[in-house]
Amino acid sequence: MTIMDCYIHNLVSACAWEIGSLRRTEMVKIAKAVGIALVSAMAVAAAGPALALPDEYVWRTYFSDETYMLEVGEYHLLCSGRTVRRGQETPYYQTYTAPCPNPPHSGPW
């Protein structure tokens, strides 16, 4: 039964029930869709922090040749898991490490 049928046949009480029933059905569908979206969003958000963070801060200095005299680049693995590269990477490097604080902080490393 459509709204137009309600006006043509003047079936006010029957039409009110039909229209209300359709609205309830649509509202249930919307509520289910919103619920599924919220549960999905919470699952994705909960999975984010589960990534393993490094145990050590790594600072690698790259040099131009085997004399280790001229620095040409750097690599940093921060305790947040972020990496920073500057300059050129070569096979000639020295690596320094330091333990990350537990729990890691939001400072520069």
Image: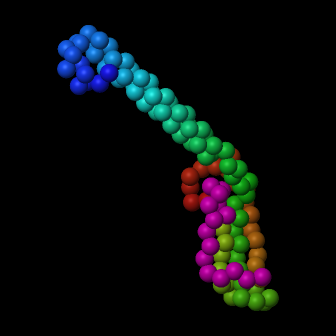
Image vertical order of residue 48 relative to residue 26, above or below: below
Is 69 on the left-hand or right-hand side of 18?
right
**Quadrant into which the C terminus falls:** bottom right
**Residue at 33 percent of width and 17 percent of height:** 18
Viewer-closest of 40 and 31: 31
Is 22 on the left-hand or right-hand side of 3?
right
**Residue at 62 percent of width and 61 percent of height:** 82
Image vertical order of residue 73 relative to residue 7, above or below: below
Where residue 107 sits, quadrant-wise, is bottom right
Where residue 3 sits, quadrant-wise, is top left
* Position of residue 62 measured from the top left corner of the image (x, y, whole percent): 71, 80
Q: Which residues are magenta?
A: 77-91
**Residue at 23 percent of width and 13 percent of height:** 11
Where residue 86 sits, quadrant-wise, is bottom right
Q: Is residue 11 magenta?
A: no
Q: Is residue 38 visible?
A: no
Viewer-closest of 72 and 98: 72
**Quadrant into which the N terminus falls:** top left
**Residue at 62 percent of width and 81 percent of height:** 87
* Position of residue 105 measured from the top left corner of the image (x, y, whole percent): 60, 50
Q: Is residue 82 magenta?
A: yes
Image vertical order of residue 37 relative to residue 67, above or below: above
Q: Is residue 59 visible?
A: yes
The residue most toward the right is: 66
Is 34 on the left-hand or right-hand side of 43?
left
